[in-house]
Structures are given as C-alpha cells and as structure tokens.
Amino acid sequence: MSSRLARSTCPVSRAVDIVGDKWTLMILRDAFEGVTRFSQFQRSLGVAKNILSNRLHQLVQADVLSLRPDAAGSAYHEYVLTDRGRQLFHLVVALREWGADNAFDAEEPRTVFVDGRTGAALPRLRYETDDGTGIRPEDTRPVRPPDWVAP
C-alpha cells in the first residue's frame, strides 16, 4: 500500500489502493465466476504472465485471495477468495450493473450474473433504511474523524 493512501482516513482511497487496478478487478470478476488456476486466469484475461503474477501476488498479500494446493490433488495451486475477498462481491456486482446499464447499446448481448440455485437474475443492488426506504446518493454524507486534516 502506498504510504499516503495507507494514512488516508478515506475507505475508498484504501480500497482503491488494494483493488483499483484494471487487471485486479478482472481477476476478481473471474474468481467470482469460479476461475482458480493461474493458467485459467491468463487464458480468460489475455494478460501478460508477469502482470498476472504480480496482481495475484498482491491479492494474496492483501488477504483477498489465498494460494492453496489444487483440490483435485494435482501439482498445481489454486487461487481462492478469502472471506475478505468474498466481501468484494457487492463491488463486482455493482460494476456489472453499471457496465450493463452504461457500457452497452440497448440490444447488445451481455453476460449476466444469476443465482446458481434458481437461475433467476440477481436483484439490483439497493441501499435502504431499516424500514425499507431507499437511500439515494444525495441522502448521504461523509463523517470525517475528529482529527481529520485535508491532504
């Protein structure tokens, strides 16, 4: 983590420092789709091996992925989402929703994420109060720590 972002009181700054890179986000997408092996990530992403190796190493160091022996007992290893990594599910779903809404023409085919048990499309992400009232961006505000100083 860069020293400036490591000192930041902003959770977005710290999160972006860990997962904000294009290839890192694509690795996370693939991990949520069940990709576990280096060769599978490389084939799916078409990224240079040195870049992929670097990003996977960073995700393991950040405890987003863990490296373990292949479940099938082969000589290979698997990259598996940790509990910390699984917490990024909402981020990946939000990026999918935004991409589907804003990066495609109306009739253009796109991949969708469905409930693997039922085949139903995932419900849209929505933030709401305890009584079910929707929360819009303009209904929110940041609350900074008492000793916060602008960078």
Image: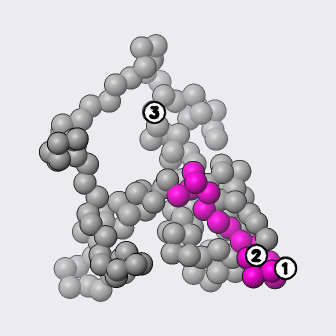
Between disc 1 and disc 3, the foreground one is 1
Q: Quadrant of residue 78?
A: bottom right
Circles 1, 2 touching at the beta carbon (< 8 Å): yes
Q: CA distance from mark 1 to mark 3?
A: 42 Å
Is residue 30 shown left or right of residue 38? left
Asked whether residue 143 appears in the rendered view, the answer is yes
Name the image quarter holding the N terminus: top right
Q: CA distance from mark 3 to mark 2?
A: 37 Å
Could you say whether the residue bearing mark 2 is in a helix, strand or loop?
A: loop
Label 2 sits on residue:
70
Between disc 3 and disc 2, the foreground one is 2
Q: Quadrant of residue 51?
A: bottom right
Q: Quadrant of residue 108?
A: bottom left
Is residue 2 shown left or right of residue 88? right
Q: Which residues are magenta?
A: 70-86
Residue 75: which numbered mark, if any? 1
Is residue 132 shown left or right of residue 25? left
Amino acid type, mark 3? Cys
